[in-house]
Image: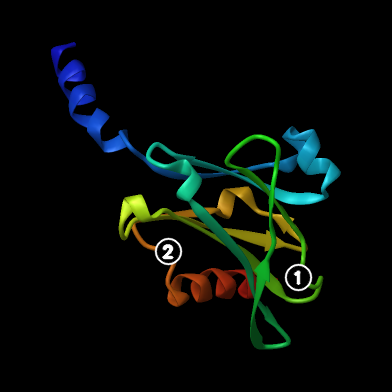
Amino acid sequence: MKHLLVLSMLAAPLFAGALVLDIGNPSANPEAVAKQAVLVARMTACKSPEKTTVTASAEGIVDGMRKSIPLKIVPLSTAGTYAITREWPPQGSWVVRMVATNPDYKDYTASVLVPLDNGALQWAGMKRYYHAPPAEADIAAMLDRRVSSR
């Protein structure tokens, strides 16, 4: 029991002041459903949350060509919660890339890649990145898996 207490005390600083990007299913949020969101992002920043910037893009391969489409981040009524709507074409293989930054966290970013299969988000294939956004190689590898599985 003592060891568990010591471990929990040591781990607490790891989560204090966190910058966290959570991705959720829009069906759980009526406002997101009304906006026809394909996913909901929830941003948590313990320090200066108002300074946090969230960006999103659809990264894909269409007819063998690499594509990148900036996506609109639609703020929802709950602070730090955003809807992402589909702005990419139905053809091709796609992943949604989201990156959250905040100047108070210096070079740290919270990021996520969410693969799509026939337009539906594949939650089990979602990959989180901490400290730095996904590199082009990470995106390419996820897209290659999408293309190979077709």
Q: Secondary structure at mark 2?
A: loop
Whole-percent x, y for residue 37 in the image: 77, 50
| Circle nearer the N terminus (2, 1) | 1
Whole-percent x, y for residue 50 in the image: 50, 45
- Residue 119's image quarter? bottom right
Alpha carbons under labels 2 and 1: distance apart: 21 Å
Q: Secondary structure at mark 1?
A: loop
Whole-percent x, y for residue 47 in the image: 37, 40
Instruction: Please identify the residue farthest to the right as the structure is shown.
Output: 34
Give the position of the N terminus as an image quadrant.
Answer: top left
Q: Nearer the viewer, residue 16 or 124?
A: 16
Residue type at numbered disc 2: Pro
Question: In the picture provided, is 91 more to the left or to the right than 15?
Answer: right
Q: What residue is rendered at 69% in x and 72% in y?
A: 93
Q: What residue is rendered at 68% in x and 65% in y?
A: 71
- Check whether the beta carbons of the residues at disc 2 and disc 1 lie within 8 A of each other: no
Residue type at numbered disc 1: Trp
- Residue 121's image quarter? bottom right
> In the rendered picture of this protein, how many numbered marks are placed on residues?
2
Give the residue at mark 1. 88
Give the residue at mark 2. 133
Q: Is residue 49 above or below residue 74?
A: above
Whole-percent x, y for residue 129 in the image: 42, 56
